[in-house]
Amino acid sequence: MTFGIRRSRPWALPEREVTDEGLWNERRRFLRLGAAAAVAGLAPPVARAAGVPRTPPLAGVRRAPPPPERPNTWEQITGYCNFYEFGTGKRDPARYAGRLRTRPWSVVVEGECERPGEVGIEEILRFPLEERIYRLRCVEGWSMVIPWVGFPLRLLLERFKPTSAARYVAFETLHEPDRMPGQRRTFLDWPYREGLRMDEAVHPLTILAVGLYGRVLPKPNGAPLRLVVPWKYGFKSIKSIVRIRLVREQPPTTWSQAAPHEYGFYANVNPDVPHPRWSQRYERRIGELRRRPTLLFNGYAEQVAHLYAGMDLRRYF
Ligand SMILES: Nc1nc2c(c(=O)[nH]1)N[C@H]1C(S)=C(S)[C@@H](COP(=O)(O)O)O[C@H]1N2
Ligand SMILES: [Mo]
C-alpha cells in the first residue's frame, strides 16, 4: 500500500489556499461520516489544548488528496519529538525549542557544483509548496502520519548545478550551543549531520519541509526547514538545516558515527532487519494502543525499492 505520492502525481491538484487544521479535519470527517452528519453539526470542534501554538499559515500550498491513514494531530506532531539539541525527552523540543532563532536564516550549498552559494529562507519559501502526507517511522519503534508542506530537494539542488563528481549530499544542522543546550553535552558530535546518496536525494519523495498542516514549520519539528525522507528511519530527516555539501564520498553521519553497529548510513525502514537491541517488525502509531506491522521501506517500496536493486539490505542497513 502506498500514499503520499502516486505515479499520477495526485498532489498536483488545482491550487487552493490551505485551510487550518480544523477545516482540514472537517473535510476528513465529512468524507468519513457523510454529508448529513457534518451538516447536522455532530462533529465536535477541534480541541485547542495548551502546547506548541499554531504558526502562521503558508500561502499558495497545493493540497494533497485525503490520505487513507488518519494524520496525527498538531498536538501529537509538535508535542512528541526527537530534537536532541533541546534535550533527549520527547517533550523537551516543545518546551525549549522556542529559543531557536529562525530569522535571519540561510543555507550554504557548496562542494561539487558549478555555482556554490547561499540561499536565504525567504527565497526558499518561494519554491512551489505542496502538501505531502507521509508516514514517519522512528528507529525507536513509534510512528506518525504527518501532513508536511515542502518541495522536492531536487529543485533546490538543481539551482547549484551539481557536477558529475557529486555522488552524495551531506547536510548539517545549525550549531548554536547558547540556544541549543543539548549541544553543550558531548554524547553526540555536534552539529547533527546526515547524508544521502545522490539518487536518494533527487528522488521525488525526498522533500525539504517548511511547513506542517498548511502552516509555518514549528520549531520543535526543525524550523525553518528540514529534510524529510519518508522511507528511511526518522533520524535521516535532519532538522534546521544550514549547510548542504555535494561530495564524492559517503559522508559521516551523526548516528552512524555514534553507534556504527546500531545505525547505518542507509537506515531504510525494514521489518526484516532488527536493530541489535530490538526487533523492527512492529511499530506503535502515536495515538494508537495496538502495534501495527512495520512495512518494508515504510510502505514506499513501490517507489524506492529500485534504488537498492542488488544491494544486500542487511549489510547496507
Ligand atoms: N538536528 C536534528 N535532526 C533530527 C533529530 C535530532 O535530534 N536533531 N532527530 C531525528 C529523529 S531520531 C527523528 S525520529 C525525527 C523526528 O522528527 P519530528 O520530531 O519532527 O517528528 O527527526 C530527526 N531529525
Ligand atoms: Mo528517530
Image: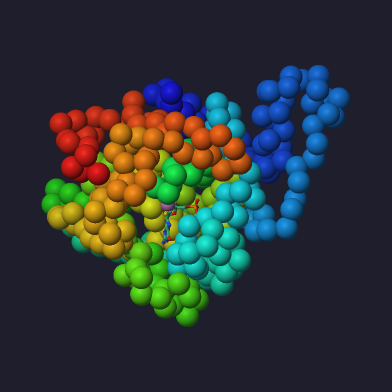
Q: Is residue 121 left or right of residue 80?
A: left
Q: Find the residue positioned furthest to the front.
A: 277
Q: Residue at x 14, y 48 (%)?
A: 164
Q: Is residue 175 left or right of residue 55?
A: left
- Nearer to us in this view, 45 or 138: 138
Q: Where the N terminus falls, by quadrant?
A: top left
The colour scheme applied to this rendered structure is: rainbow
The total of numbered circles placed on residues is: 0
Q: Where the C terminus falls, by quadrant?
A: top left
Residue 48: image x %, image y %? Answer: 75, 50
Q: Is residue 252 left or right of residue 173?
A: left
Residue 195: image x %, image y %? Answer: 28, 54
Q: Is residue 179 above or below residue 278?
A: below
Q: Residue at x 30, y 34 (%)?
A: 272
Residue 203 can be seen, yes or no: no
Q: Residue at x 42, y 49 (%)?
A: 140
Residue 133: image x %, image y %? Answer: 51, 37
Q: Find the residue positioned furthest to the bottom.
A: 178
Residue 64 can be seen, yes or no: yes
Q: Find the residue positioned furthest to the right.
A: 40
Q: Is residue 119 above or below residue 159?
A: below
Residue 84: image x %, image y %? Answer: 45, 64
- Nearer to us in this view, 163 or 272: 272
- Residue 300 sits in which quadrant? top left
Q: Residue at x 58, y 28 (%)?
A: 66
